[in-house]
Amino acid sequence: MSSRRYVRGWGAMSLAVGAVLVGTAAQSPADRDTPPAGAPDPTTVISVDGCATDGGLCSVPRRTLVLSGAHTLTGHPVTLGAQATGPVSLLLRSPGRLADVTVTDRRGRRVAGTPSADGTSWTSAGALPAGGRYTARLVVERPASGADAPHRHLTRLEFRTAAAPAGERLTVTFGPEDGGTYGVGQPITAELSHPVPAEDPAARRVVERALQVRTTPRVEGSWHWVDSATLHYRPRDYWPARTGIRVHSALNGLHVGSGLFGGPSRPLTLTTGDRIEAVTDVSALEMTVFRDGRAVRTFPVTTGKAGYRTRSGIKVVLGKEPLVRMRGDSIGIARGSQDSYDLKVRWATRVTWSGEYLHAAPWSVDAQGSDNVSHGCTGMSTEDAAWLFRTVREGDLVRVVNGYGEPMTPFGNGFGDWNLSWAEWRRGSALAGPVAAGPATTETSLRPAL
């Protein structure tokens, strides 16, 4: 059995990449040790490289290995050095081309990667997680003399990545709650345990690529950086009704940047229900509720009066409270003033964190359908409010059209994500364009709400 050999001149460039190396010629076992006459030498020279691509000159040398196609080479796996934090590349240094490259992890899952146009290298799609062990199966094609077909032989090598150093880990908390059924307007949220500033776009790209969303049926969507520690995910349009959604973090073991590595995070699974959309026409003073595009109920409402106009645009149901106490002084209205109120309100469906609800307002039934008299909420009869309360769920859509109020902001006071166009939404992705620095937009003044 032959021993491991290194190409003369490459020894000074040895990378701490370890390998258990196996080479087998494309022949029957009986004549494996005797290459056919005229067959090219099956010896293959491969370099393994793990340099980071965004860090300028690589301080980690590569290791170049000589693999024999006629013998088995043994050795204990060594590990990619801790400095090798970029994508892993396999480079053919001997004559020929890599006709096929398959890299799998210890569970047999294929690692995504791309071969070069000339067939002399393969590079993983991204950096590989720390503490992983991988097997590369290489089919090397050598040119043959004369009219003979090119000769191929199989070589296999195993390598592993260094364990992550001790220290804090970047983890992710996904929302909404796992296992539920939500409306088609529900965004996916990702709260990071450590901030990733816009001034480090490479780290943001690592994070965003690792936050994986899979849907049935397939839906086009994108993450958007709300701030340095928060991302939201939404499709181009609303989720299709009855969509299965699974969210997973592949950050565990990945080098994010500045010595920070990803840690394990709990996945999220949810589904969407029927497409429920409540549309309030402020000018007409009525609400129409649609289920899967079909109008199922229309009833009179009242919305915000002058000075307390109901926000226009698209909102998402945040929650429901069968009974809630609403007080004007909690939002800055002086007690005893003309606009002061202190009421117990039934069948309240919340659409902003600042206190905008769709709720029963039996005291304003005479104005419903004829005048806007509320402090910003959408009021309706007790019967209609109870029906709406039973009909909608978290994530359902609430649209306010033909109104006079300020537009709903995208972030900071509920889920206003759908008020951004798809082009605007994509600009918030680290994978699609520049990401603006600074905190998320929030409302500077909160409207009083009944």
Image: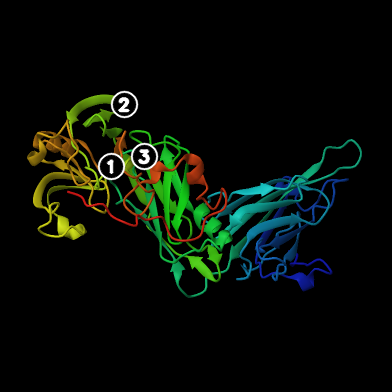
C-alpha gap between disc 3 and disc 2: 20 Å
- In which quadrant of the rendered view does residue 330 lie? bottom left
Residue type, mark 1 in image = Thr
Q: Is residue 184 above or below residue 92?
A: above
The tag earlier along the polypeptide, 1 or 3, is 1
Residue at far bottom of view? 166
Question: On residue 140, which mark appears?
Answer: none
Q: Is residue 60 above or below residue 32?
A: below
Depicted 126 relative to depicted 315: above or below: below
Q: Position of residue 364 (x, y in %)?
A: 10, 39
Cα gap from disc 1 to disc 3, whole angstroms: 9 Å
Circle 1 residues within 10 Å: few <14, some 14–19, many ≥20: many
- Sooner in the amino-acid sequence: mark 2 or mark 1: 1
Q: CA distance from mark 2 to mark 1?
A: 19 Å
Screen quadrant of the N terminus: bottom right
- Please tell me the numbered disc located at residue 293: 2
**What residue does disc 3 label?**
244
Tell me, yes or no, if residue 53 can be seen here: yes
Which amino acid, mark 2? Gly
Packing grade of label 3 (10 A; few <14, some 14-19, many >=20) is some
On the image, the x and y values in percent for residue 421 come to 46, 40
Residue for point 31% across, 26% down: 293
The residue labelled by disc 1 is 181
**Circle 3 sits in a helix, a strand or a loop, which is it?**
strand
Q: Is residue 378 left or right of residue 268?
A: left
Amino acid residing under circle 3:
Gly
Task: Specify the farthest residue to the right.
Answer: 146
Q: Is residue 274 visible?
A: no
Evaluate if marks 2 and 1 touch, with contact meaning CB atoms under 8 Å apart: no
Q: Secondary structure at mark 2?
A: loop
